Amino acid sequence: MYKLDLPVDLKQAAAIERRRNMEKQRQSRIFNAKERIIGVDVQALDQQVKDRQVREETEDARAEAFAADAVRNDKVVVLMEQRQEQDIRNLNKAVNDFRKNFQVPETRREFDLNDPDALKKDKPARLTDDDPRCGISGLQKLDGEDLNSKARTKYQQEQMREWTKSQINERNAADMNQKHADLLYEMKARELDQRACELAAAEEECRRQINMATKNFNLAQQREKDEQEAMKRQQQQDDNYTELSNHIYGDMLTENPAVAQSAFGAHRVITDRWKGMSPEQLADIRNRQEQQRQEKERLEMEERLRNEEWDKQRVDADRAAVILERREERLKKELERKQAHENLRLGAEQKAQREFLDREVYRNNITADFFSQFNTSSR
């Protein structure tokens, strides 16, 4: 019989109890939302904290750089404003200096209306007898008065004296200038005449030298031309004798067949020396042409037989292709008919299975017992 009263293993019981306690502690930790830390990546969180610190430090450094740039720009703006203000002050100073030196009140068009010393600078009511301001109604001038008779007479005498002296001086200066101009003209005319004589003599000598040099050159050219013509006639005569000799005793008139042989092979000739083919060569060419004609007829016959064979094979292939195509169409129709029957059968089976599941399997509703089985263990 089986022994059911075996002693309990204390070590195993202690291990089971320890696992139960650990499970309870684990459940208390996991099911407590405030103390649950499962699923948290501490290293990732530390890395995020470090990244955030680095980002904040970078943003602080960037903000400090922008602040330093702003301070520098402010300093530059202040310096530019100071320079602009200094330029404006210099410009205003230059404008004031210009107004002080070149736009004084005395130069204005309407200064006579605002001049404080206008009465001091104004003319008296009457200056001379012919003053245009002295009208009839002013009673500043009466008939018969001559206030400036002595001064006018003295001025007229001085003016007449000056005119006479000026005319005498002008007349003397004109005479002196005319004499000097005549002297210069005469000297220039003599110089031009002498220069013309010298140029004419030099031109005559130059023309004589040119004519002599031209004559000598023409004589030398004529002698050289005569010598060249004599040499050319002698050379032409020698060439004619040589040509006649070559034609008489040459291979062309003697019709030497060896001269037409080419240095590139016995089957090649020199065309400008060749006198034609021999009867043996002509007969050989005709024989070769006849052989080529017969060979061509044979090749054409073979080609025609080959084309007929290919046409026959192509017709047979087309007929076989039509038969195979008709067979494939019949097989395809048969396969489509079988597939339609199979689809109808599968549709009926699926419909019956769906009705069975709806009628027999899916009848139970979800109750609270279904949800109570969750969160019972930490595993």
Image (spheres, rainbow, N blue to C red):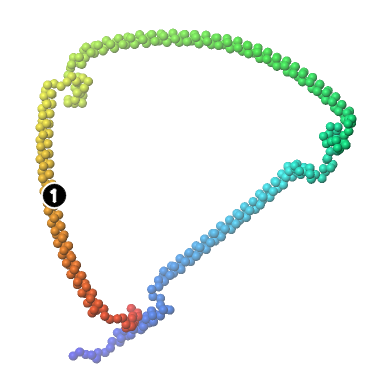
* Res. 33 visible in picture: yes
Front-lying residue, 296 or 67: 296
Q: Name which residue lies at 38% across and 79% down.
A: 30
Q: Is residue 128 left or right of residue 92?
A: right
With 95 as the anchor, is 289 left or right in this view? left
Residue 15: tell me if it is visible.
no
Q: Secondary structure at mark 1?
A: helix
Q: Quadrant of the C terminus?
A: bottom left
Which amino acid does the dot numbered 1 rest on?
Asp
Q: Which residue is drawn at the image coordinates 88% and 37% (left, top)?
A: 139
Image: 51 above or below 170 = below
Taking depth in this image into account, of 128 and 379 the one nearest to the observer is 128
Quarter-of-image position of residue 121? top right
Q: Position of residue 342 (x, y in %)?
A: 17, 67
Q: Position of residue 341 (x, y in %)?
A: 16, 67
Which residue sits furthest front?
A: 137
Which residue is at the front of the view, 22 or 66?
Answer: 66
Among the 4 quarters of the image, the one containing residue 39: bottom left
Residue 369 against residue 63 in the figure, above or below: below
> Number of callouts in the render?
1
The residue sitting at 77% across, 18% down in the picture is 172
Quadrant in which the N terminus is drawn: bottom left
Residue 131 or 338: which is nearer the viewer?
Answer: 131
Against 203, is 110 above or below? below
Q: Residue at x 48, y 66 (%)?
A: 53
Residue ID for mark 1: 318
Horizontally, is 356 left or right of 111 in the view? left
Residue 190: percent from left, percent from top? 65, 12
In the rendered image, residue 17, in percent from the top left (x then y), is placed at: 33, 85
Callout 1: few (<14), some (14-19), or many (20+) C-alpha neighbours within 10 Å? few
Image-based side of 242 in relation to 105, left or right: left
